[in-house]
Amino acid sequence: MSLLLCHIANSVGTSTEDIATMSLHYILQSSTTARDTLLDYIGTELGLQFEKDVHFELQSCGENLERPDMSLRNSHNDEILIFEMKFWAALTDNQPNTYLERLKKKGGNGLVFVCPKSRIISLVDELATSANYEKPQGRLLQKDGNPPMLVLSWEEVLAKLENVIQSDALYNDLLQLKGLTGEMDNQDFKPFTAGDLNVNMANRIIDYYRIVDKIADSLLIHKICNTKGVRATAQKFGYCRYLRIDNPATGLGIQFNCNLWQKGICGKTTPFWITFKSIDENNNWVAYSPKLRYNLDDKGTKYLIEKSDKSDMLIVPLYPKLNTNEFEMVEDLINQAKRLIDLL
């Protein structure tokens, strides 16, 4: 896929979010089918039906000089939806509350955020906290008497449009936008702030490593696990302590993992995870135990399966208690790990 649009985005002063928004706006305004397809999809998510005579408008300035990325307006030029396009930049002062108030005053139907798939869970949490909204259906946020908020991914939005765009020229434009959003999903950079470089940030990162060590050391001290070979390793996404269980022969990993932290599971996020693989007679770590997966399913415990060419790994989140001291929080994480090990 050509990355011409991505190259242009990196070469000019305009933000990649603005370029992506302008590109999406052009496609929607150029294709009635694309516009109707996206609005049907959003309408299904929000429980709404939009009239056909609508148009999209870029950066419509409001009473407080706020400029949302894109708005949907009806035949009377009333603002029906507000769109905010994000990659990894933080929410601005106007997002979401100023826009929600603007919609509420004008009788608007909703606020839609579009972001990378891997940011959906964390963005939903940010929006719910900032606006004091509930999130009963994951990415749909609601509050009585207020416009709903919906968080979509760039991937799903562009996939919907790709299925219906017939024009060769417009299809090529869409591929350029896909290239830009895909590249920004992996590479876009949120500028450092003074808080990011504060010594407290360093101390907090070290805390994550220490907590992994405390969980692993406790399992070793109480002879629940032992260790042979590699004991600990720093990884691209964090830090891992490797442990073993002899009966049944199982390899464990107690992890601080930023990649898994970003993804989360079932709407919840955590930096701490425990991984499982069986160990064969040649001391190779192979696919996870089917018995463990069955027991997790039986107890309704959520988990992830990480597939690879060699063998699959079962991954279970460990959720730290909030607003408590270190001893109680670590002790609770240790007990969570023990309960999972008991399922073997």
Image (spheres, grey):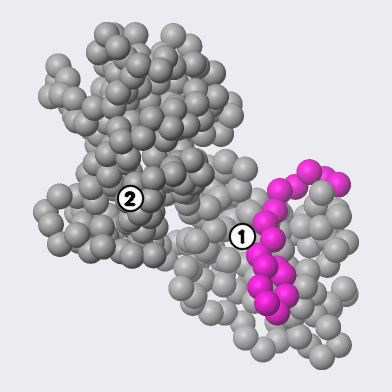
Q: Residue at x 31, y 64 (%)?
A: 3
Name the foreground residue: 261 vs 256.
Answer: 261
Q: Which residue is mark 1?
A: 273
**Is residue 119 shown to the viewer in this render?**
no
Dividing the picture into quadrants, the one containing residue 317 is bottom right
Residue 299 among those drawn in magenta: yes
Q: Amino acid at mark 1?
A: Trp
Q: Residue at x 82, y 49 (%)?
A: 297
Q: Residue at x 19, y 54 (%)?
A: 194
In-image side of 321 versus 244 (left or right): left
In-image side of 328 versus 323 (left or right): right
Residue 11: x percent and y percent?
15, 62
Residue 136: x percent and y percent?
58, 26
Q: Main secondary structure of the magenta part?
A: loop
Dividing the picture into quadrants, the one containing residue 113 is top left
Looking at the rendered image, the disc whose residue lies closer to the viewer, 2 or 1, is 2
Q: Amino acid at mark 2?
A: Ala
Region rendered in magenta: 298-313
Q: Residue at x 62, y 86 (%)?
A: 230
| Circle count | 2
Residue 156: x percent and y percent?
49, 44
Q: Relative to 108, does residue 221 appear above or below in the rendering?
A: below
Q: Which residue is mark 2?
A: 169
**Is residue 315 shown to the viewer in this render?**
yes
